[in-house]
């Protein structure tokens, strides 16, 4: 089946899922973020095109991502709370439908405001799809959650590779970017149909539909879950690590514009760069899976984070395209290792509060990191802002992460 072929092809050890978890459920759980990354990878590298077609400023580009985050800020705490209590099927399918509607809006947008509406719709769909799948992955492999999540991220990276690759292929073939975006929306529709007819694992604390339909119960459960998660010291530490990682990632919100404007890559060249980064990611994740057999996740995390305190600045300062390729490879490699380790750590710190933990991470966009970074870049330049913010985020991760064992 899917999981067997996947691990054989990459020469990985087979992980045994929990009894009762079907291959179809595993396939859809592992390909949820693949679908998300496929879509995001496409519209992310289209930032130079959006700016040219709609004549946007840097702040307007940053506002698109910020609007997405603001919408997710409202939607995701509610849907994440439901992960612990209700059928996961409809969360996955509903998220895919909203994501498809978002891409259709982007692909047919006649104006900046219509484009912004498409980004807002993506904020509705991405959370229910991805955050539910995250929980399903670590629940399916309770004895090896870090390796399971690393493999999930490996599949995601394939989607993140294909998204920019689609844009690059279309650009070189002379196909409109709008066609690419609409075709990807159809993929999300297909995923939604598959998820709607699949049985996933039951939530840890199921409740009746009549209780869920009462808004007061939902708010009370969300608040109590968030309070319990924040009150648990280990969960609180993992949440701080994830927030610092968000700060680090915010540094790169204008990365593709910088590659286009300052480094001098074409739109197709930017898409090729993004696709090449994903190849590095795939290699990093395969190696991570092997390393975790006999190495502590905390030790791998700290080594990668130490490297990320200096690599972004070296990347910005490197001479020419060749210099940035040389530094960009270890930068992409180290960046990739952080997410699966930090995320799986947060979801297993207290397994009964996985949904509540996801709800808290959904509140992170209260801090408008993308907009702040765009404004910072407008003042001092994209390159310097990227180097400073990334160094700060990596140093903060080191400060709050778990010490590595001797």
Image (cartoon, rainbow, N blue to C red):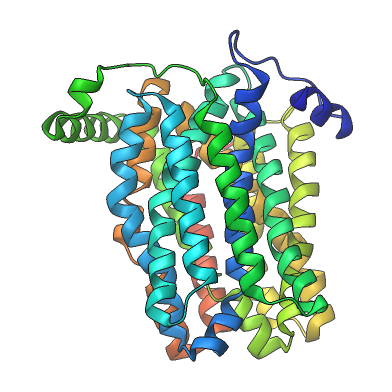
- Of residue 258 and residue 187, the one placed in the foreground of this image is 187
Q: Is residue 310 visible?
A: no
- What residue is drawn where x is 61% and y is 74%? 46
The quarter of the picture where residue 87 lies is top left
What residue is shown at x 54% (from left), y 67% (from top)?
391
Q: In this orientation, does residue 229 appear?
A: yes
Which residue sits furthest top? 19
The residue lying at 47 percent from left, 66 percent from top is 105
Q: Is residue 85 above or below residue 299?
A: above
Question: Residue 23 falls in which quadrant of the image?
Answer: top right
Image side of residue 217 versus residue 8, left or right: left
* Figure disc tally: 0
In the foreground, 292 or 181: 181
The C terminus: image quadrant: top right
Q: Quadrant of residue 145?
A: top right
Nearest to the observer: residue 228 or residue 48 = 48
Picture coordinates of residue 274 (x, y %)?
71, 67
* Residue 146 place in picture, x, y as percent: 61, 30
Q: Position of residue 254 (x, y in %)?
A: 54, 76
Q: Quadrant of the N terminus?
A: top right
Residue at screen point 54% across, 32% down: 195
- For residue 36, side relative to residue 294 (left or right): left
Relative to 69, is 223 above or below? above
Q: Residue furthest left?
A: 216
Q: Indicate the position of residue 321 as horizontal and vertical percent values.
A: 80, 82
């Amino acid at each position: 089946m899917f999981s067997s072929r996947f691990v054989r092809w990459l020469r990985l050890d087979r992980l045994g899922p929990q009894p009762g978890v079907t291959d179809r459920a595993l396939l859809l759980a592992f390909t949820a973020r693949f679908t998300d990354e496929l879509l995001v990878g496409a519209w992310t590298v289209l930032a130079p095109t959006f700016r040219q077609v709609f004549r946007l400023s840097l702040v307007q580009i940053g506002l698109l991502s910020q609007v997405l985050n603001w919408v997710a800020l409202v939607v995701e705490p509610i849907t994440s709370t439901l992960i612990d209590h209700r059928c996961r099927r409809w969360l996955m399918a509903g998220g895919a439908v909203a994501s498809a509607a978002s891409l259709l809006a982007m692909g047919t947008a006649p104006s900046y405001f219509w484009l912004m509406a498409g980004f807002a719709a993506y904020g509705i769909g991405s959370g229910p799809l991805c955050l539910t799948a995250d929980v399903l992955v670590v629940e399916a492999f309770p004895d090896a959650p870090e390796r399971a999540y690393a493999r999930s991220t490996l599949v995601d990276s394939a989607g993140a590779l294909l998204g920019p690759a689609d844009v690059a292929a279309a650009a070189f073939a002379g196909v409109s970017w709008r066609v690419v975006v609409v075709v990807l929306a159809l993929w999300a529709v297909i995923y939604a149909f598959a998820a709607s007819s699949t049985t996933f694992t039951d939530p840890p604390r199921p409740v009746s539909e009549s209780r869920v339909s009462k808004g007061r119960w939902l708010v009370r459960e969300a608040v109590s879950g968030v309070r319990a998660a924040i009150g648990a010291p280990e969960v609180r530490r993992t949440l701080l690590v994830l927030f610092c990682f968000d700060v680090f990632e915010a540094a790169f919100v204008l990365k593709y514009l910088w590659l286009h404007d300052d480094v001098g890559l074409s739109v197709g060249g930017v898409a090729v760069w993004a696709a090449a980064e994903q190849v590095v990611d795939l290699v990093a994740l395969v190696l991570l899976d092997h390393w975790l057999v006999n190495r502590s996740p905390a030790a791998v995390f700290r080594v990668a984070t130490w490297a990320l305190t200096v690599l972004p600045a070296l990347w910005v300062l490197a001479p020419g395209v060749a210099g940035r390729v040389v530094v960009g490879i270890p930068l992409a490699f180290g960046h990739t290792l952080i997410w699966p380790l930090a995320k799986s750590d947060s979801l297993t710190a207290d397994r009964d509060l996985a949904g509540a933990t996801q709800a808290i991470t959904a509140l992170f966009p209260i801090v408008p990191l993308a907009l702040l970074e765009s404004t910072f870049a407008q003042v001092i330049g994209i390159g310097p802002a990227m180097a400073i913010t990334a160094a700060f985020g990596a140093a903060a991760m080191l400060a709050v992460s778990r010490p590595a064992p001797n």
